[in-house]
Every structure is written in C-alpha cells, then in structure tokens.
Image (cartoon, rainbow, N blue to C red):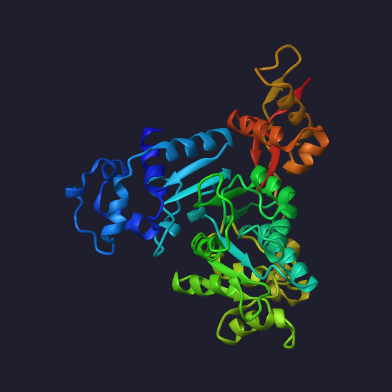
Amino acid sequence: MAALKYWVWLTTLPGLTNRSKLLLLEHFPSPEDIYYAQPEDLPPVEGLSSSQAALLSDKSTDRAEDVLARCAKGDIFLLTMQDALYPDRLRNIYDPPVPLYGRGRMPLFDEEAAVSVVGTRTCTPYGISAAEELGYQLAKEGAVVVSGLARGIDGASHRGALRAGGFTAAVLGGGVDVVYPAENRRLYEDIAATGVLLSEYPPGTEPMGSHFPVRNRILSGLSLAVLVVEAPERSGALITANTALEQGRDVFAVPGPIDAPNSRGSNRLIRDGAGLVTCGWDILEGYRSRFPHRLRPSPENLPPVPEQDSLPAQRAEESSTAKPEKKETPPALPVLDLTADTAGLTDDQIRILQVLTTDAPLLTDDVAERADLPIRRVLSALTVLEIDGYATQHGARRFVRTVEIRL
C-alpha cells in the first residue's frame, strides 16, 4: 500500500502529462524515488520541460490517499506498470497508461485473443444488429471482446459477448466507479460482475470529451485486432483504427450500403486494405494457430464432412471390417457425503453443487437462476468450489461438478 501511494501521487499530479510520467519512470527506479528527489537531483530528462519538472515540488499525498480510499471502498483494483497482471501488449505501445484502475476480474490479456469492437454512437439498426451478433460470435468462439461501453456499437458488442457467456472488457473515459452513459447502468453492472471495467483515470473522474480519443489507444493496445462495425467519415472509431495500425494491430471492418453515411468510414477502411468481416471467424481464423486451446469455430464455420462414398475404396473397406474399439469406462467420481458433515461448505455452495451436473457444463447465469441466488454470490461460491476441487470450469463461465454428492 505504501508503494502504491507514490504511484498514485505521481499519476495524479495536476498538469503532468502521461508522457512526462513515463519519461520520469525511465530515469528513476520507482515513483518513491521521484517523490524524494530534490530539484537539484533531477537529471535532465529529454522531453520534460522545466515547468513540468517544477510540478514535482508538490509533495502532498492527500489526493493519493483519497484515491486509495475510494479504491478500497469501491472494490477497485489498481495495476502499475510493474505488476505481473499489467499486459505486455499494453506496456509495449508508445504511450501506455501508467496506472490501470479496474473493477471485476483482470484476465491475462497476453494469453487471450482479444478483439476490440468499435463504431459510432449514432448507429443504425443494421449497425446494432451486426455489432451484437459479431460480439456474440467472437465470444462464443473464444475471444475476449473489448469495447468502450458507449451507447451504440460499443454497448451492442458487449451485450452480444455477455449473451454468449463470454468475457468482455470495457475501457472507460472516466473513473471505473462512474457509470456513463446512464442508460448502460445494467450493462455496466453485468460487466463488473462477469468481466472487467478498466480506466487510466482515478475513481470519481467524470467522463470528458477529451478523454475518449485518448482512451482509444488502450482499446487497441489490449487487443490483437480492431473491428470497425459502422463508422461515418469523421468518427472516433476511425481514430481507434488508425491507432491500431500505428501499434501494429490488425484492422477489420464490416461493409455497409454504399450510400449509407454511417458506413462511409468503414467502407473506406476496406477499400484501403482492412479485412472485410461478415462473421466472427473471419477475424479469429488467422489467430487460431497462436491460441489453439482458446479459439474454436462455430459449427457453421467447420469444413464439411466428406461423404462415405467419397472415401477411397480401401479406406471404406477397412472401415467396414474394422472391429469396434472397446470404450473405456470413465473412472468413478469421488463421493462427497454431506449427510453427516457439510465439509465446511456454506449453504450457497451446497445449493450450487446440487444444481451442477457432472457431464453438462452450466453457464453461471443458469446456475444463478436454478439456485435462485444473486450472480455475485454464485461467482464467489464457484471460485471456492473450484479451489477445493468440487467443481471445474469448462470454457468461459461454464462449470461442472467433479464429485458425486450424498445429501
């Protein structure tokens, strides 16, 4: 906590740009060393003006202590660039955010096929439909869907990912404890419960127009690719696409009618070389070899099974004469006898064990519905059950029971 105080002190100094903070961190081992450095000890830092260096004379930690108190109260985590959970993908862009505040569960982004889905807020019904369907497909096929929780395309892509039972990350233009826009409150709560909300701005920061173009570099920085669903000629989504190209990310776009104003920007991206997308697998197929255990095509994207009579005659003959293989009987599951002793399990955990099956993975939402429990309590109980070896996860947010129970 003491070390975090100096990170927050540095990153909340009024007037100090993110780039200035990065330059200082290149010259000092830690923010604590910057805090205790005297003006005469400050080395000449290329790109840091004397007026910016003078800001370091403000040694008050009141702002930092207030931010840390908000984090503790609001169940908000703080990642610094020295933390293992801070993604290398993001650390290696030109202007990475020095801190990352978050609510929810931070995934290992470097091990995920993350795709940012962006587009205009003033979208058409076609754009909403395409964004939700593509968010659903990407999540269903194993990708993490990243977007900005704005109205329009952003919100639709998040909803699609959640509908698929997948993981989605929202990068905000204000503090992670500030819901914006208000109409997305329920979506905000769903993502906080099952995904992650991220921001470089401290808790309590109200969204400002200038924040959104800046946060776009984080959207693309966390991802392998950016998908533009619907964007007019002047659109923040095009800024994200250009930033993605500068970061070496892939850019894709959904085509739209040639006379539709909201599709002029995305159509132009395709004309200039962006990948044309009609389904999620158009994007993910290129990453399958890198993430073989993450990505799986939907049945409609699998190659057709050859007809029996199209097999060579020899293979067909061998197939007809071969002896059927003896199926192995799966080993019996261990028995958890709760008739006399609850084994330290809570009522919630026992109820969830009764709901789970040993062969058909259930989504956490379905578990919550069948157990008649709030999703937050279900997620907490499942975590403990998984640690204790009584349940295991199969894919994104799907669980099975690993023991037979007696009640």
Q: Quadrant of residue 168?
A: bottom right
| Relative to 382, 50 lies left or right | left
The image quadrant where one finds the C terminus is top right
Q: Position of residue 12 (x, y in %)?
A: 42, 47
Front residue (pair 404, 58): 58
Q: Position of residue 275 (x, y in %)?
A: 59, 78
| Relative to 62, 367 lies left or right | right
Instruction: Determine the residue positioned at 77% across, 71% down.
Output: 308
| Relative to 24, 85 lies left or right | right
Front residue (pair 262, 59): 59
Number of callouts: 0
Q: Quadrant of residue 378?
A: top right
Q: Is residue 360 visible?
A: no
Instruction: Determine the residue positioned at 71% across, 82% down.
Output: 261
Instruction: Determine the residue positioned at 41% across, 43% down.
Output: 8
Q: Position of residue 246 (x, y in %)?
A: 45, 73
Seen from this angle, which residue lies furthest left?
A: 40
Front residue (pair 8, 158): 8
**Above or below for 325 versus 64:** below
The image quadrant where one finds the N terminus is top left
